[in-house]
Amino acid sequence: MKKFLKELSKRFQKKVVRIDKRVRFVVSALLLGALMLFSTFFYFDKWYIFLPLLIIMTYLVTYFSLAEGIEELGWFGLFVMPIAVSASFYLVYFLFPGRWLTRIPFIIFYEISIYAMIVCSNIFNVGVEKNLGLYRAAFSINFLYQAIVSFLIFNLVFALKANFIINGAISGVIGIILGLNLFWTIRLKRHLEVEVKNYSILLGLVMFELALLASFLPLATPVYALFLTGGYYSLAGLIYNHMDEKLFIETIREYVAVFGFVLLITYLSLSW
């Protein structure tokens, strides 16, 4: 079976590589945009159909876009953010009114986002040297969308008004998954480094604790999401700069200032 799948993959790649990559990127974004648009015409009680379908389709079209050169850990790392964007956008859409006025901008932003994530995955896949601006831009965009995705997911988690254990568990898992992706892109190794795994677990543990703490605070749902996103962004930023040997005093001040500002907003939003 394994040999059959490899042979099938090779044949698929030979055919796909004849298509210009930019064309593949656009086609992939349009296909996923059409599927996302179609899913918005159904109520959220059909999530068990559309969520798995979107995840599978995102994986397939991302593979279609990248096709060649995917090896070992790349089968995980290169697909995390496109899937996370598709899943989080679908889940959060139902918090908004189901009107064309919100549907059209939402689909456009989703297509732009999924296109950007596929392009970033392609840059990581081809192994661009870190001293090139292309890699730095891809890394920054990837990190930015991690913040967006985390905000959307945390917003949904607290909107469900679940108990503090569920809030903490989901937040911790999200922290680990996003951390694995972010820290892997620093060196783009074919295997999972112990340092990447350990820092991802640490990040997930802190997110678990922050979610537990937030669950006992009287806050509006968007403020919960902002608090956890600020925590993720600041801690993940400090860790990746440390791993990249660029953790200077100015960098520490920047991330501490960001989290301090978020804490201030959170404190001012408390409704005792």
Image (tube, rainbow, N blue to C red):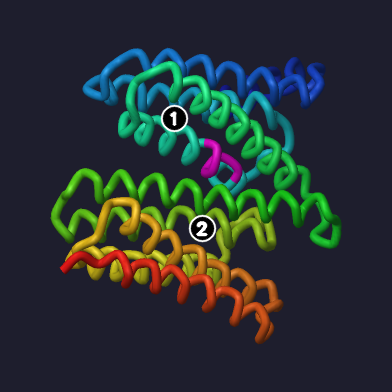
Residue neighbourhood size for the residue with mark 1, other residues' Cα within 10 Å, grouped as few (<14), some (14–19), many (≥20):
some
Q: Which residue is mark 1?
A: 55
Q: Which residues are magenta?
A: 78-82
Q: Is residue 155 above or below residue 199?
A: above
* Element class at badge 2: helix
Residue 264: quadrant of the picture: bottom left
Q: Residue at x 20, y 65 (%)?
A: 271
* Element class at badge 1: helix
Q: Which mark is residue 217?
A: none
Indicate which disc, 1 or 2, sits on the residue closer to the N terminus.
1
Amino acid type at mark 1: Ile
Q: Are marks 1 and 2 in contact (CB under 8 Å)?
A: no
Instruction: Tell me where residue 21 appears, x and y as whole percent.
Output: 78, 26
Q: Which mark is residue 180?
A: 2
Using the numbered discs, state the Cα–Cα distance from disc 1 to disc 2 in whole angstroms. 19 Å
Amino acid type at mark 2: Leu
* Residue closer to the observer: 126 or 151: 151
50 relative to 253 in the view: left or right? left
63 relative to 138 in the view: left or right? left
Residue neighbourhood size for the residue with mark 2, other residues' Cα within 10 Å, grouped as few (<14), some (14–19), many (≥20):
many
Residue 123: quadrant of the picture: top right
Q: Residue at x 22, y 22 (%)?
A: 45
Magenta stretch, main secondary structure, is: helix
